[in-house]
Image (cartoon, rainbow, N blue to C red):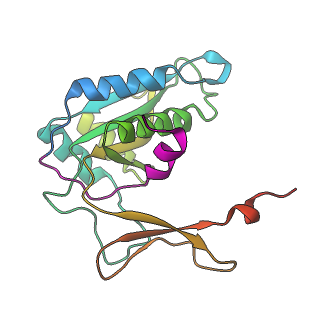
């Protein structure tokens, strides 16, 4: 059994996947069912989801996303390394416009559930929203908030301590290992 600490530690933003590894739609439904159980501001539950596990829809979603802004010489995953599934998180504005952080709670829960299943993901907010709206025919009352890219990981991501005054930008070394600097715990706790 995975401990919560283990799941959180392994839940890194993954940007290269084994695209040929198919994720069944039922798995995406299970992940949304998990998110459905999370807290919601005033219990309004305004989140809606679009699930994609088919290559044709995935091919329409992929060009609407911006990948890894700190990696200036990388345009995102190449064919064969792209996600095999996506979950688009939407806010139904007919329910409420006061959704606070529901999308973040749901996204993190989905990603932790994915890690538990041996998958990886990347929470994406750099979205060409109007293009995605057209591609997926998303009604106007649904606000596009996040896209979760999901798949079987095809990269190694390691955490490392960030020295005071150090650079927070993630980077890849000569072996293509993805390094993510994290501030030290003693730097985070004020009192």
Query: Is residue 35 toward the left or the right of residue 186 in the image?
Result: left
Residue 88 in view: yes
Q: Nearer the viewer, residue 180 or 42?
A: 180
Q: Quadrant of the N terminus?
A: top left
Is residue 33 shown above or below 152? above
Q: Nearer the viewer, residue 145 or 163?
A: 163
From this viewpoint, which residue is outermost toward the bottom?
Answer: 174
- Main SS of the magenta part reads loop
Residue 95: image quadrant is top right
Q: Nearer the viewer, residue 6 or 38?
A: 6
Residue for point 62% across, 16% down: 43
Query: Is residue 22 toward the left or the right of residue 176 in the image?
Result: left
Q: Position of residue 141 (x, y in %)?
A: 45, 25
Query: Is residue 10 shown in magenta?
Result: yes
Q: Position of residue 117 (x, y in %)?
A: 32, 36
Q: Position of residue 6 (x, y in %)?
A: 48, 46
Query: Is residue 26 toward the left or the right of residue 97 in the image?
Result: left
Residue 138 in view: no
Residue 100: image quadrant is top right
Q: Position of residue 188 (x, y in %)?
A: 74, 60
From this viewpoint, which residue is outermost toward the right?
Answer: 191
User: Which residues, given as a range, are shown in magenta?
Assistant: 1-20
Query: Is residue 119 shown in magenta?
Result: no
């Amino acid at each position: 059994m995975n401990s919560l600490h283990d799941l959180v530690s392994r839940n890194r933003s993954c940007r290269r996947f084994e695209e040929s590894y198919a994720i069944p739609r039922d798995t995406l439904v299970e992940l949304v069912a998990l998110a459905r159980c999370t807290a919601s501001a005033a219990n309004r539950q305004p989140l809606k989801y679009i699930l994609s596990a088919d290559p044709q829809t995935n091919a329409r979603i992929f060009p609407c996303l911006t990948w890894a802004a700190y990696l200036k010489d990388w345009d995102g995953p190449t064919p064969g390394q792209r996600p095999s599934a996506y979950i688009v998180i939407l806010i139904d504005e007919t329910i409420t416009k006061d959704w606070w952080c529901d999308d973040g709670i749901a996204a993190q829960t989905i990603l932790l559930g994915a890690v538990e299943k041996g998958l990886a993901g990347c929470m994406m907010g750099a979205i060409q929203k109007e293009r995605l709206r057209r591609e997926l025919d998303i009604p106007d009352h649904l606000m596009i908030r996040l896209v979760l890219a999901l798949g079987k990981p095809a990269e190694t991501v390691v955490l490392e301590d960030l020295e005071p005054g150090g650079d927070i930008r993630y980077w890849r070394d000569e072996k293509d290992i993805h390094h993510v600097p994290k501030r030290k715990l003693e730097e985070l706790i004020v009192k």
